[in-house]
Amino acid sequence: MARRKNDFDEAPAGSEILLDRATDHGWLRIEQDPSAPSGRIVYLDGVACSYIDLDDPQHLEFTYIQRFAGIIEAFWPAPFPLRVTHVGGGAVSLPRYLADTRPRSAQLVYEYDGALIELSREHLGLTTFQGFKVKIGDARPRIDRRSPGSADVVVGDAFVGRTVPPQLASQEYLEAVHDVLDEGGIYLLNVIAGPDLHLARRHAATLRSVFSTVLVSADPDVLAGKVSGNLVYLATDRPVRSLPIGPILAACTSGSYPDRVIRPDEISRFAAGAPVLTD
């Protein structure tokens, strides 16, 4: 399957629908990738949220997932084991990838929709693997109760439609995420932004209110307000001088559709005037 410029574009022509049914909190559709017999395109409420290759967990089709994986690799080259918390599981493509490339990692997934996980087990080859746990329910109270310094990476990839749930976007929530991260830890966030970029700027302003270093990676047309698309945010308390900025830039500008990266020294201009999100 040729990678799409926007990760939520419509499926390629000829996709066969393998499953189309309600989950606990939405509607799931699974289509076969017509160009790859082992490829599965996963939609939640009409939005393409995951791509699973049943034969290859290291095949990351969606650009934003590639950015997540590349940024993690920039900080901690594989097979270094990590403690990773995923807020939003979807079809669990990133956890599968990390389990395959970093087999001694400890991964915890918070997923609101229990039926989605069960259907992933039945139809997408999700199995229990070492160091992998799933907790069903709202991630907010679970993050609030977590022990300080208990994760190296927190990944935010939870949506209602195309919007991050408010309780998982606020300054108060990010303060809890900040506490969960160990020294030198990183928070990665996926946001789908419309052409006005209003909410994207608010996410940036909110991250800057909690973390000392923030950058954004996205398709240049998305950042120019020409199209809707995914933005990947990196937030950390590491000082800019200690960031592996070369590998980060390489990870975000690779592939058929290289991103533009808004660096930490540019983020204040991107977020200027945007109100912070609060509970």
Image: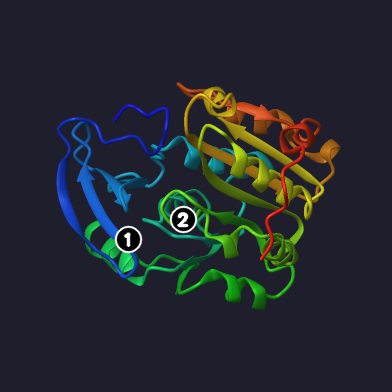
Q: On the rendered structure, is 245 left or right of 46? A: right
Q: Quadrant of residue 153?
A: bottom right
Q: Quadrant of residue 277?
A: bottom right
Residue under label 1, please give it.
126
Q: Is 188 above or below relative to 168?
A: above
Q: Nearer the viewer, residue 264 or 193?
A: 193
Q: Is 39 above or below relative to 219?
A: below
Q: Verify CB contact (< 8 Å) between mark 2 and mark 1.
A: no
| Residue 29 visible in image | yes
Which amino acid is tagged 2? Phe
Can you tell which mark lies on residue 159?
2
Where does residue 237 sit, x and y in percent of width and height? Answer: 80, 51
Where does residue 200 sit, x and y in percent of width and height? Answer: 61, 41
Say which residue appears at 71% left-offset and 48% top-offset: 235
Q: On the rendered structure, is 97 left or right of 235? A: left
Which amino acid is tagged 1? Leu
Element under disc 1:
loop
Marks 2 and 1: which is nearer the front? 2
Q: Quadrant of residue 270?
A: top right
Where does residue 50 sit, x and y in percent of width and height? Answer: 37, 47
